[in-house]
Image (cartoon, rainbow, N blue to C red):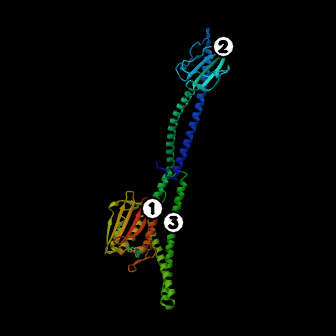
Amino acid sequence: MRLPVPGSLRLRFLLAVTLWVLLGIGAIWFSAVRIFSQHVEQSYHEELEVHVRELGGLTEIATDGAIVLTRPLSDPRYSIPLSGFYWQVTAAGHAPLRSRSMTRGSLDESIAHSPEILHRLDNGPTGPAITYGFTRKGPAGEDIHFVIATDQRELDRLIGSFTRDLSAWLAGLAALLLATGFAIISFGLKPLDRLSLAFARLRHGETDKLEGNYPAEIAPLAADLNAYIHQNEAMVARARVQAGNLAHSLRTPLAIITDEAERLAERDEYRAAGTALLDSASAMEQQIEYQLARARSAAGKKPSGRGVVVPDVAIPILQAMARLHPDKHFSLDATSCEGLVLPLDPVDYAEVLSILLDNAGKWSRGHVSLSFACDKDASCTVRIVDDGPGIPEHLIGEAFGVGTRFDPDVAGSGLGLPIAEDLCDGMGIELTLTNGAKGLVAELRYAAGSSEQV
Ligand SMILES: Nc1ncnc2c1ncn2[C@@H]1O[C@H](COP(=O)(O)OP(=O)(O)OP(=O)(O)O)[C@@H](O)[C@H]1O
Ligand SMILES: [Mg+2]
């Protein structure tokens, strides 16, 4: 079972089920204890009433005036010393008769003041006691007081032991209900888990639509999403083509403008206007080249389900670089990452590597090193180190601007780094440039689970 995360549907259900079970079990516990206490109290009272009647029936005044019982009471607890069960018969002019259990103290006979059986909570020989009593006339017309009492703690003990047993049972039942509730939630949310897995595969480029069968409640959502994805892909592709077409269609008029501006700049009276026009035209040309390069790279992109295989992704690029910069030596170190697959688009990733390796090749004096350092959780840092002049520290931030170039002696259009940054943003990769001990160090940092889109 997956652990619920804050804000998740699973956590909401778990909290709701827990609350529901606790409320239900709490209500059962409360009502059961109440009902049981009432029943026990009632049966105790009935029993005491029967006993006091029995006491009345068994009592006689002997000829010598002594109060006697024709036989002992049927409940043996009245014979056990200080058992909590007591009786007493008193009458004016006669010695009182008490149960054998009452080895000390006496019962208050004031409750027995009427022929009707009355009861109340009194103090008995061993603590608070439920006391029943009534009177009857003796042979000489005297009042005989019959009193019977049972310790309140007997009742409390019974209710207490019931409450303990009930609590244990209900705790077990609550645990069972919670466990089954959690299992039901897991089972019910399974299709959503499958949907999120399907999403992950879609994002990693393993599929080009949401796959799988879903319950009636989710199936329309999956179908709508698939339709939306399809529509979106077509829209993005169209937009890229249109951006490419637009950039392309602007090229010729821009070439004419540049041509005219150059001619203006040659004439002294229009030199300032001509130069301003040339600067703007050059900025526009860079933007056009950038858009065309992005449109070209997107058009050549095929969806791939493989992800980036390290270091395989770098091998063909290094071969191309060796041909492009034959006087430079490129080395590769990927010992800690052999066979690692990053869930990223291999085409975009390869393009970023190409741009950075091409730069390193262009500016290095002789040696470029490419190294991969990976963690077990598929986080990967790539370092491309050259032994060239690097970039002045205060200009590093500007290197990512479209058309920015610091070295007019080396051919280029200043589009490589902005394109690389754009692609890295899309993949959730952090791209940094720093000046190392020998030359420029380009670092690509990818943390597992951080890819935005593939
Ligand atoms: N490894 C490097 N060493 C020294 N300077 C570099 C390095 N990489 C980039 N630069 C500087 O940053 C500028 C921008 O690089 P970028 O890749 O965007 O453009 P480019 O290489 O000049 O042209 P393009 O890549 O479009 O062919 C470069 O012109 C160069 O001045
Ligand atoms: Mg470049």
Question: Do the CB atoms of the residues marked 1 and 2 lie less than 8 Å apart?
Answer: no
Disc 2 residue type?
A: Gly
Relative to 45, is 297 on the left or the right?
Answer: left
| Residue nearer the viewer, 200 or 266 | 266
Query: Horizontally, is 404 left or right of 151 in the view?
Result: left
Q: Is residue 276 above or below residue 124?
A: below
Disc 1: which residue: 451
Q: Amino acid at mark 1?
A: Ser
Q: Amino acid at mark 3?
A: Ala
For the point 60% across and 30% down, the residue is 38
Q: Secondary structure at mark 2?
A: loop
Instruction: Answer whether labels 3 and 2 touch (C-beta < 8 Å).
Output: no
Question: Would residue 84 appear left or right of 449 to someone viewing this image?
Answer: right
SS assignment at label 1: loop
The residue singled out by tag 3 in the image is 234
Mark closer to the observer (3, 2): 2
Q: Residue at x 40, y 71 (%)?
A: 355
200 or 27, which lies in front? 27
Q: Distance between the Cα atoms at labels 3 and 2?
A: 111 Å
- Tell me if the residue at label 3 has its CB under 8 Å from ligand 1: no
**Residue 332: percent from left, percent from top:** 32, 66
Q: Is residue 86 visible?
A: yes
Mark 1–mark 3 distance (CA, rounded to whole Å): 22 Å
Position of 151 relative to 21 (above/below): above
Q: Which residue is mark 2?
A: 138
Residue 257 in sight in this render = no
Mark 1 or 3, closer to the camera: 1
**Looking at the rendering, in which quadrant would you find the C terminus?**
bottom left
Q: Nearer the viewer, residue 169 or 220?
A: 169
Relative to 212, is 328 on the left or the right?
left
